[in-house]
Amino acid sequence: MTTRLALAGLLALLLFLTAYPLAMLVYGSLHTTPPGEPGAFNLDGYRAMLSSANAVVLLNTVGLSLVKTGLAMVVALFLAWIVARTDTPYRDTLEVLITLPFYIPPILTAMAWGMLATPKGGLINLAWTGLTGDRAPLVNIYSYGGVVWHMMQYSTPFLFLLMVGAFKSMDPALEESSRMSGASSWTTFRRVTLGLMLPVTTSAFLLSFIRGVESFESALIFGTPAGIEVITTEIYHLIHHTNTPDYPQATALALGIMVLMFGLVAWQWRLLGGRSFFTVTGKGYTPRVTRLGRWRWVTFAFCLLFFAVTVVLPVSQLVIGSFFKFFGFYRMSMLTVDHYTAVWSSRLVWRALGNTLLLGLLGATATMLLGAVVAYVLVRTRTGVRPLVEVLAWLPWMMPGMVLGIGFLWAYALMPGPIQLYGTLWALLVAYVSLGTPLAVRTMSGAFSQLALDLEECSRVHGAAWWTTFRRILLALAWPAFAVGWILIFFIILRELSASILLYSVGNEVLPVVVMRMWTEGKAGQVSVIALVMLALVFVFRFGERRLVRTHLSPS
């Protein structure tokens, strides 16, 4: 009976975190008034969605994401090959440097590139004018190219993370057989290496494409000023930048994203269904390393160039921007620390920093505990509700932050009972837990799968209750994976803007929202200071994660 009650409670929680906001999306798309107000039901939101303007928005969304994902895939494959399969010097260090842009909140690099590559006053264009005398800007970040460029900077390390492991674990005998049969190196790479990696590459491509479709910061900062709208920015503008918020159309668009996501997942399942891709055999082997000769320094330089462009350049701009009085006027007479003073004395910034840290600490802890319990059900039990638990825990992967934010707006406004979350800090916490649950479940499922059942059974035989066994045996043994997952969830919360910008209220701001507000107010110097504070948090937690991985998770 206790087990059934516990499973019922877990299902109820997962339903609230995933199915409830999805159901409220359907409700909101049919409702004529904003959340919490009385109204009627009709199909006006869907009629408005099926307009020629929204068709252009959809084409922009799909086109930008496809181009971004294709270009990022090529660069990421090359970087993964360099790190995993060549004798390029300092490959372990390069792997850390290449992945670092993934952990930096996109809103920060967006602001930095807004200062670097704006046509008038951008540091790159000022340097170009100073060197050549040409007044025409070298680059213009406010364009289709600018949106793709910024999206690539965090998509490439994301794809790299997904593919570098597959390169490292592939049996070289499979490629050697191809070459012994007369195939060239290029043919072997294209038809054998990439062919065997098809599950990894298609999954990576799909996930990156989904991230592109749900991208918000790049399109908002660089696309909107150029008249380029995507689905997420259109939803945002329909709610925040119209005289009367158009919730029916915004919610219908959100459901449209969901349909697109599910269609992509179904396409991947059909593509890979019934095919076998064995890249790791039972034989012992060491992945073959390609000797590049003098070219190894060229590949080394390429990796350093990627790091310099995606990390060093934008971070340097933020440092420079924090010390100059006006953006675009870089003279010694303009040096100042006023921006630091203004940020230091700002109650809004301190409140947002406190809210962000509180939500990060509570959210990461709650998400990982929930993920551990769900992973236990999936890995250690044979209960009949396992498929339903798995689907509910996985569902937020298909719900971009903007979509989930709208769903929870409706969910909070119509929540029955005495507990009301609408307009509170806890509204953000619930959304963050929902967004992070799939990652937490995946992390803990892998950790629990490596633990023998004997350990748990021994504890039970000696009279320990389930919770005691779970806490003192399973979590204690899996704590390195738990800690790594905790840090990753903290990163997700620190960088989340699309859901936060819909769910926050006055007094409950978080740092990404404050950065966005100050940027729109033209306070580039203060934005740079806050961005440096957030980057310091990123580097501290990233260092902690790497140290933990090396100490406890690396093979001895």
Image (cartoon, grey):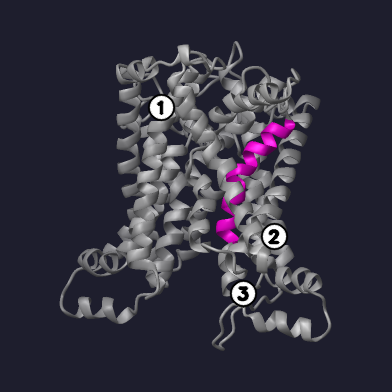
- For image coordinates 31% across by 59% down, the residue present is 6
Q: Is residue 381 visible?
A: no
Q: Secondary structure at mark 1?
A: helix
Drawn side of residue 392 relative to residue 61, left or right: left
| Of the image marks 2 and 1, the number of the one nearer the N terminus | 2
| Of the image marks 3 and 1, the number of the one nearer the N terminus | 3
Taking depth in this image into account, of 341 and 284 the one nearest to the observer is: 341
Taking depth in this image into account, of 329 and 318 the one nearest to the observer is: 329
Taking depth in this image into account, of 111 and 365 the one nearest to the observer is: 111
Q: Is residue 324 visible?
A: yes
Drawn side of residue 91 relative to residue 177, left or right: left
Magenta region, residue range: 144-163
**Mark 2 nearby-residue class (10 Å; few <14, some 14–19, many ≥20):** some
| Foreground label between 3 and 1 | 3
Q: Are marks 2 and 1 in contact (CB under 8 Å)?
A: no
Which three-letter amino acid code belongs to the residue tagged 1? Ile
State how far apart marks 2 and 1 are (Cα): 41 Å
Q: Look at mark 3 in the image and give the residue it sits on.
A: 289
Q: Look at mark 2 in the image and give the residue it sits on.
A: 268
Q: Quadrant of residue 346 in the image?
A: top left
**Mark 1 nearby-residue class (10 Å; few <14, some 14–19, many ≥20):** many
Which three-letter amino acid code belongs to the residue tagged 3? Val
Q: Look at mark 1 in the image and give the residue it sits on.
A: 530
Q: Quadrant of residue 341 in the image?
A: top left
Magenta residue check for 148: yes
Residue 59 position (above or below residue 549): above
Drawn side of residue 313 relative to residue 140, left or right: left
